Image (tube, rainbow, N blue to C red):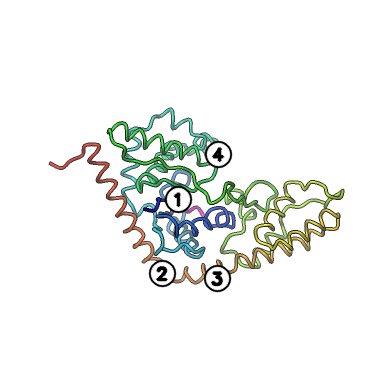
Amino acid sequence: MKETVVSGIRPTGKLHLGNYFGAVSNFVKMQHEYNCYFFIADLHSLTTHPTPQDLNGYVKHVLVEYLACGIDPEACTIYIQSDVPEVAELYLYLNMNAYLGELERSTSFKDKIRSHPDNVNAGLLTYPSLMAADILLHHATKVPVGKDQEQHLEMTRTFGNRFNRLYNKEYFPEAYAFSYSDKLVKVPGLDGKGKMGKSEGDGNCIYLADSPEIIRKKVSRAVTDGGPTAENQTKPEAIQNLFDLMSIVSSPDTLAHYNDLYNKMAIRYGDFKKQLAEDMIIANNPIRERIEDIANDTDYLRKVAHTGAEKARESAQKTIKEVRELIGFKPF
Protein backbone atom coordinates (compact mmCIF):
# COMPACT_ATOMS: atom_id res chain seq x y z
CA MET A 1 0.00 0.00 0.00
CA LYS A 2 1.36 3.44 -0.95
CA GLU A 3 2.22 5.89 1.82
CA THR A 4 0.16 9.07 1.90
CA VAL A 5 1.63 12.50 1.20
CA VAL A 6 -0.20 15.76 2.04
CA SER A 7 0.90 19.28 1.13
CA GLY A 8 -0.71 22.63 0.43
CA ILE A 9 0.08 26.11 -0.76
CA ARG A 10 -1.62 29.35 0.30
CA PRO A 11 -3.40 31.32 -2.48
CA THR A 12 -1.93 34.72 -1.70
CA GLY A 13 -0.75 35.42 -5.23
CA LYS A 14 0.80 33.81 -8.29
CA LEU A 15 3.39 31.02 -8.08
CA HIS A 16 7.01 31.88 -8.83
CA LEU A 17 10.14 29.96 -9.83
CA GLY A 18 10.95 29.46 -6.15
CA ASN A 19 7.64 27.61 -5.66
CA TYR A 20 8.22 25.52 -8.76
CA PHE A 21 11.82 24.44 -8.24
CA GLY A 22 11.49 24.37 -4.46
CA ALA A 23 8.32 22.32 -4.05
CA VAL A 24 5.98 21.87 -7.00
CA SER A 25 8.49 19.98 -9.16
CA ASN A 26 8.78 17.50 -6.28
CA PHE A 27 4.98 17.19 -6.19
CA VAL A 28 5.05 16.15 -9.85
CA LYS A 29 7.41 13.29 -8.98
CA MET A 30 5.59 12.28 -5.82
CA GLN A 31 2.18 11.90 -7.44
CA HIS A 32 3.31 8.76 -9.28
CA GLU A 33 4.95 7.11 -6.28
CA TYR A 34 2.68 7.97 -3.35
CA ASN A 35 -0.98 8.49 -2.50
CA CYS A 36 -0.90 12.29 -2.79
CA TYR A 37 -3.29 14.99 -1.59
CA PHE A 38 -2.32 18.47 -2.81
CA PHE A 39 -4.60 21.27 -1.66
CA ILE A 40 -4.99 25.00 -2.08
CA ALA A 41 -4.97 26.38 1.46
CA ASP A 42 -7.56 29.13 1.22
CA LEU A 43 -8.60 28.71 4.88
CA HIS A 44 -4.97 29.16 5.95
CA SER A 45 -4.69 32.35 3.91
CA LEU A 46 -7.37 34.03 6.05
CA THR A 47 -5.07 34.02 9.09
CA THR A 48 -3.04 36.87 7.59
CA HIS A 49 -5.42 38.06 4.82
CA PRO A 50 -8.86 37.95 6.52
CA THR A 51 -10.51 40.18 3.90
CA PRO A 52 -8.89 39.24 0.57
CA GLN A 53 -9.84 41.36 -2.40
CA ASP A 54 -10.13 38.41 -4.78
CA LEU A 55 -9.84 35.09 -2.93
CA ASN A 56 -11.53 33.18 -5.75
CA GLY A 57 -9.12 34.69 -8.26
CA TYR A 58 -6.11 33.75 -6.15
CA VAL A 59 -7.40 30.19 -5.78
CA LYS A 60 -7.87 29.96 -9.54
CA HIS A 61 -4.30 31.21 -10.10
CA VAL A 62 -2.85 28.43 -7.95
CA LEU A 63 -5.11 25.73 -9.41
CA VAL A 64 -4.20 26.72 -12.97
CA GLU A 65 -0.50 26.87 -12.14
CA TYR A 66 -0.53 23.54 -10.28
CA LEU A 67 -1.97 21.93 -13.41
CA ALA A 68 0.39 23.80 -15.75
CA CYS A 69 3.39 22.57 -13.76
CA GLY A 70 2.36 18.96 -14.35
CA ILE A 71 0.27 17.99 -11.34
CA ASP A 72 -2.15 15.44 -12.78
CA PRO A 73 -5.63 15.21 -11.21
CA GLU A 74 -5.83 11.62 -12.49
CA ALA A 75 -2.65 10.65 -10.61
CA CYS A 76 -3.33 12.48 -7.33
CA THR A 77 -6.03 14.34 -5.43
CA ILE A 78 -5.90 18.10 -5.95
CA TYR A 79 -8.55 20.09 -4.10
CA ILE A 80 -9.49 23.42 -2.56
CA GLN A 81 -9.30 23.31 1.23
CA SER A 82 -12.62 25.09 1.84
CA ASP A 83 -14.41 22.54 -0.38
CA VAL A 84 -13.78 19.92 2.32
CA PRO A 85 -15.72 20.98 5.45
CA GLU A 86 -14.31 18.01 7.39
CA VAL A 87 -11.06 19.99 7.64
CA ALA A 88 -12.80 22.56 9.83
CA GLU A 89 -14.48 19.88 11.94
CA LEU A 90 -11.24 18.05 12.72
CA TYR A 91 -9.58 21.44 13.36
CA LEU A 92 -12.22 22.07 16.04
CA TYR A 93 -11.63 18.71 17.74
CA LEU A 94 -7.86 19.16 17.75
CA ASN A 95 -8.21 22.65 19.23
CA MET A 96 -10.10 21.15 22.18
CA ASN A 97 -6.93 19.30 23.15
CA ALA A 98 -4.32 21.89 22.11
CA TYR A 99 -2.85 23.86 25.00
CA LEU A 100 -2.47 27.63 25.02
CA GLY A 101 1.15 27.51 26.15
CA GLU A 102 2.31 25.22 23.35
CA LEU A 103 0.48 27.28 20.72
CA GLU A 104 2.01 30.52 22.03
CA ARG A 105 5.51 28.99 21.85
CA SER A 106 5.17 28.41 18.10
CA THR A 107 7.99 30.27 16.34
CA SER A 108 5.75 31.21 13.42
CA PHE A 109 3.13 32.68 15.80
CA LYS A 110 5.80 34.86 17.43
CA ASP A 111 6.98 35.98 13.99
CA LYS A 112 3.46 36.75 12.80
CA ILE A 113 2.49 38.86 15.80
CA ARG A 114 5.64 40.93 15.21
CA SER A 115 4.85 41.40 11.51
CA HIS A 116 1.05 41.74 11.92
CA PRO A 117 0.60 43.41 15.35
CA ASP A 118 -2.78 44.79 14.32
CA ASN A 119 -4.16 41.35 13.39
CA VAL A 120 -3.25 38.90 16.17
CA ASN A 121 -6.27 36.65 15.69
CA ALA A 122 -7.21 33.19 16.98
CA GLY A 123 -6.49 31.74 13.56
CA LEU A 124 -2.83 32.79 13.83
CA LEU A 125 -2.62 31.21 17.28
CA THR A 126 -4.21 27.93 16.20
CA TYR A 127 -2.51 27.74 12.77
CA PRO A 128 -0.65 24.55 13.88
CA SER A 129 -3.99 22.87 14.67
CA LEU A 130 -5.32 23.66 11.20
CA MET A 131 -2.14 22.36 9.58
CA ALA A 132 -2.44 19.22 11.73
CA ALA A 133 -6.04 18.76 10.60
CA ASP A 134 -4.97 18.90 6.93
CA ILE A 135 -2.40 16.16 7.53
CA LEU A 136 -4.22 13.90 9.98
CA LEU A 137 -7.46 13.99 8.00
CA HIS A 138 -5.85 11.78 5.34
CA HIS A 139 -3.57 9.83 7.74
CA ALA A 140 -0.50 11.17 5.96
CA THR A 141 2.95 9.93 6.95
CA LYS A 142 4.99 12.18 4.65
CA VAL A 143 4.76 15.96 4.37
CA PRO A 144 7.06 17.93 2.04
CA VAL A 145 7.84 21.05 4.05
CA GLY A 146 10.70 23.49 4.49
CA LYS A 147 12.67 24.14 7.67
CA ASP A 148 10.24 26.88 8.72
CA GLN A 149 7.38 24.36 8.96
CA GLU A 150 9.17 21.55 10.82
CA GLN A 151 8.01 22.83 14.23
CA HIS A 152 4.40 22.70 13.01
CA LEU A 153 4.95 19.13 11.88
CA GLU A 154 6.31 18.26 15.32
CA MET A 155 3.14 19.77 16.80
CA THR A 156 1.06 17.67 14.38
CA ARG A 157 2.68 14.56 15.83
CA THR A 158 1.99 15.90 19.35
CA PHE A 159 -1.70 16.50 18.60
CA GLY A 160 -2.14 13.13 16.88
CA ASN A 161 -0.43 11.19 19.66
CA ARG A 162 -2.39 13.10 22.31
CA PHE A 163 -5.64 12.16 20.55
CA ASN A 164 -4.51 8.53 20.47
CA ARG A 165 -3.79 8.55 24.22
CA LEU A 166 -6.97 10.37 25.17
CA TYR A 167 -9.20 7.97 23.28
CA ASN A 168 -7.06 4.88 23.91
CA LYS A 169 -6.53 3.92 20.28
CA GLU A 170 -3.52 4.11 17.93
CA TYR A 171 -5.57 5.92 15.32
CA PHE A 172 -3.47 8.72 13.83
CA PRO A 173 -0.03 7.84 12.43
CA GLU A 174 3.01 10.08 12.86
CA ALA A 175 3.91 12.29 9.90
CA TYR A 176 7.45 13.36 9.07
CA ALA A 177 9.09 15.89 6.77
CA PHE A 178 9.93 14.51 3.35
CA SER A 179 11.99 15.51 0.34
CA TYR A 180 13.54 13.65 -2.57
CA SER A 181 16.92 15.05 -1.59
CA ASP A 182 18.71 15.75 1.68
CA LYS A 183 18.75 19.44 0.82
CA LEU A 184 15.74 21.33 -0.52
CA VAL A 185 16.42 23.56 -3.52
CA LYS A 186 16.77 27.18 -2.41
CA VAL A 187 15.81 29.59 -5.17
CA PRO A 188 17.26 33.07 -4.48
CA GLY A 189 15.41 36.28 -5.23
CA LEU A 190 16.54 39.15 -7.42
CA ASP A 191 16.89 41.67 -4.60
CA GLY A 192 20.36 40.55 -3.57
CA LYS A 193 19.40 38.83 -0.33
CA GLY A 194 17.42 35.82 0.81
CA LYS A 195 15.15 33.51 -1.14
CA MET A 196 12.59 34.28 -3.79
CA GLY A 197 9.29 35.17 -2.14
CA LYS A 198 6.16 37.24 -2.73
CA SER A 199 6.55 38.98 0.64
CA GLU A 200 9.71 40.66 -0.66
CA GLY A 201 7.83 42.33 -3.53
CA ASP A 202 7.16 41.57 -7.18
CA GLY A 203 10.62 42.73 -8.22
CA ASN A 204 12.17 39.89 -6.21
CA CYS A 205 10.21 37.17 -8.04
CA ILE A 206 10.01 35.64 -11.48
CA TYR A 207 6.39 34.46 -11.66
CA LEU A 208 5.45 31.42 -13.73
CA ALA A 209 3.00 33.59 -15.67
CA ASP A 210 5.51 36.37 -16.39
CA SER A 211 5.98 37.23 -20.07
CA PRO A 212 9.48 37.23 -21.63
CA GLU A 213 9.44 41.03 -21.61
CA ILE A 214 8.69 41.17 -17.89
CA ILE A 215 11.38 38.59 -17.10
CA ARG A 216 14.00 40.57 -19.05
CA LYS A 217 13.03 43.77 -17.25
CA LYS A 218 13.14 42.19 -13.78
CA VAL A 219 16.49 40.47 -14.33
CA SER A 220 18.01 43.64 -15.76
CA ARG A 221 17.17 45.37 -12.47
CA ALA A 222 18.62 42.62 -10.27
CA VAL A 223 21.06 43.82 -7.63
CA THR A 224 24.76 43.65 -8.56
CA ASP A 225 27.95 45.43 -7.51
CA GLY A 226 30.86 47.17 -9.24
CA GLY A 227 32.41 43.86 -10.27
CA PRO A 228 35.23 41.70 -8.84
CA THR A 229 38.33 43.51 -7.63
CA ALA A 230 40.62 40.45 -7.44
CA GLU A 231 40.91 37.17 -9.28
CA ASN A 232 39.09 34.16 -7.80
CA GLN A 233 37.56 36.24 -5.03
CA THR A 234 34.55 35.05 -3.05
CA LYS A 235 31.32 36.33 -4.56
CA PRO A 236 29.18 38.64 -2.38
CA GLU A 237 25.67 37.37 -1.57
CA ALA A 238 23.87 39.36 -4.28
CA ILE A 239 26.18 38.05 -7.02
CA GLN A 240 26.22 34.50 -5.67
CA ASN A 241 22.41 34.56 -5.72
CA LEU A 242 22.42 35.33 -9.45
CA PHE A 243 24.92 32.55 -10.10
CA ASP A 244 22.72 30.18 -8.05
CA LEU A 245 19.78 31.13 -10.25
CA MET A 246 21.90 30.44 -13.33
CA SER A 247 22.82 27.01 -11.93
CA ILE A 248 19.09 26.18 -11.85
CA VAL A 249 18.01 27.37 -15.32
CA SER A 250 21.16 27.34 -17.47
CA SER A 251 23.41 24.62 -18.85
CA PRO A 252 26.56 23.62 -16.90
CA ASP A 253 28.70 24.99 -19.74
CA THR A 254 27.03 28.39 -19.53
CA LEU A 255 27.47 28.52 -15.77
CA ALA A 256 31.13 27.49 -16.07
CA HIS A 257 31.71 30.16 -18.73
CA TYR A 258 30.45 33.02 -16.55
CA ASN A 259 32.17 31.66 -13.46
CA ASP A 260 35.43 31.70 -15.41
CA LEU A 261 34.83 35.29 -16.54
CA TYR A 262 34.10 36.35 -12.94
CA ASN A 263 37.22 34.65 -11.63
CA LYS A 264 39.33 36.40 -14.31
CA MET A 265 37.72 39.80 -13.49
CA ALA A 266 36.40 39.90 -17.08
CA ILE A 267 32.68 39.54 -16.43
CA ARG A 268 30.24 42.11 -17.82
CA TYR A 269 27.09 42.02 -15.70
CA GLY A 270 24.94 43.30 -18.55
CA ASP A 271 25.84 40.28 -20.70
CA PHE A 272 25.52 37.96 -17.72
CA LYS A 273 22.01 39.22 -16.90
CA LYS A 274 20.89 38.97 -20.53
CA GLN A 275 22.00 35.33 -20.63
CA LEU A 276 20.30 34.60 -17.31
CA ALA A 277 17.05 36.20 -18.48
CA GLU A 278 16.99 34.26 -21.76
CA ASP A 279 17.65 30.98 -19.98
CA MET A 280 14.86 31.76 -17.48
CA ILE A 281 12.50 32.46 -20.38
CA ILE A 282 13.38 29.14 -22.04
CA ALA A 283 12.88 27.26 -18.75
CA ASN A 284 9.60 29.02 -17.99
CA ASN A 285 7.99 29.22 -21.45
CA PRO A 286 6.35 25.75 -21.52
CA ILE A 287 4.70 26.40 -18.15
CA ARG A 288 3.59 29.93 -19.10
CA GLU A 289 2.00 28.66 -22.33
CA ARG A 290 0.12 25.93 -20.46
CA ILE A 291 -1.04 28.51 -17.90
CA GLU A 292 -2.60 30.58 -20.69
CA ASP A 293 -4.35 27.53 -22.20
CA ILE A 294 -5.68 26.13 -18.92
CA ALA A 295 -6.81 29.51 -17.54
CA ASN A 296 -9.22 29.86 -20.46
CA ASP A 297 -10.78 26.40 -19.97
CA THR A 298 -13.36 27.13 -17.28
CA ASP A 299 -15.19 23.83 -17.71
CA TYR A 300 -11.98 21.85 -17.16
CA LEU A 301 -11.09 23.85 -14.04
CA ARG A 302 -14.57 23.35 -12.63
CA LYS A 303 -14.34 19.60 -13.28
CA VAL A 304 -10.89 19.33 -11.64
CA ALA A 305 -12.05 21.21 -8.53
CA HIS A 306 -15.29 19.19 -8.25
CA THR A 307 -13.62 15.81 -8.75
CA GLY A 308 -10.81 16.71 -6.34
CA ALA A 309 -13.29 17.73 -3.63
CA GLU A 310 -15.16 14.43 -4.06
CA LYS A 311 -11.97 12.38 -3.77
CA ALA A 312 -10.72 14.36 -0.76
CA ARG A 313 -14.08 14.14 1.00
CA GLU A 314 -14.22 10.38 0.57
CA SER A 315 -11.08 10.11 2.69
CA ALA A 316 -12.10 12.94 5.02
CA GLN A 317 -15.60 11.65 5.74
CA LYS A 318 -14.24 8.24 6.73
CA THR A 319 -11.82 9.89 9.18
CA ILE A 320 -14.45 12.17 10.69
CA LYS A 321 -16.90 9.29 11.11
CA GLU A 322 -14.29 7.28 13.00
CA VAL A 323 -13.10 10.29 15.04
CA ARG A 324 -16.68 11.10 16.11
CA GLU A 325 -17.17 7.50 17.22
CA LEU A 326 -13.92 7.52 19.21
CA ILE A 327 -14.85 10.79 20.93
CA GLY A 328 -18.31 9.49 21.71
CA PHE A 329 -20.64 11.36 19.37
CA LYS A 330 -23.40 8.88 18.62
CA PRO A 331 -26.94 9.31 17.26
CA PHE A 332 -29.84 8.46 19.53
Q: Nearer the viewer, mark 1 or mark 3?
A: 1
The location of residue 235, given as percent across then percent down, is 77, 48
Reading the image, the residue beneath label 3 is 289
Which disc is residue 121 wearing?
none
Real-space CA distance between mark 1 and mark 4, rounded to the nearest whole angstrom? 25 Å
The location of residue 119, given as percent across then percent down, is 47, 39
Reading the image, the residue beneath label 4 is 115
Looking at the image, which residue is at 35% across and 46% down? Answer: 137
Hey, what amino acid is under mark 1?
Answer: Ser
Hey, what amino acid is under mark 3?
Answer: Glu
303 relative to 196 in the view: left or right:
left
The answer to which of marks 2 and 1 sits earlier in the sequence is 1
The answer to which of marks 1 and 4 sits earlier in the sequence is 1
Nearer to us in this view, 177 or 111: 177
Callouts 3 and 4 close, C-beta under 8 Å: no
Query: Looking at the image, is 118 positioned above or below residue 229?
Result: above
* Crowd around label 3: few <14 · some 14–19 · many ≥20 (10 Å): some
Reading the image, the residue beneath label 1 is 7
Real-space CA distance between mark 2 and mark 3, rounded to the nearest whole angstrom? 16 Å
Label 1 sits on a secondary structure element that is strand
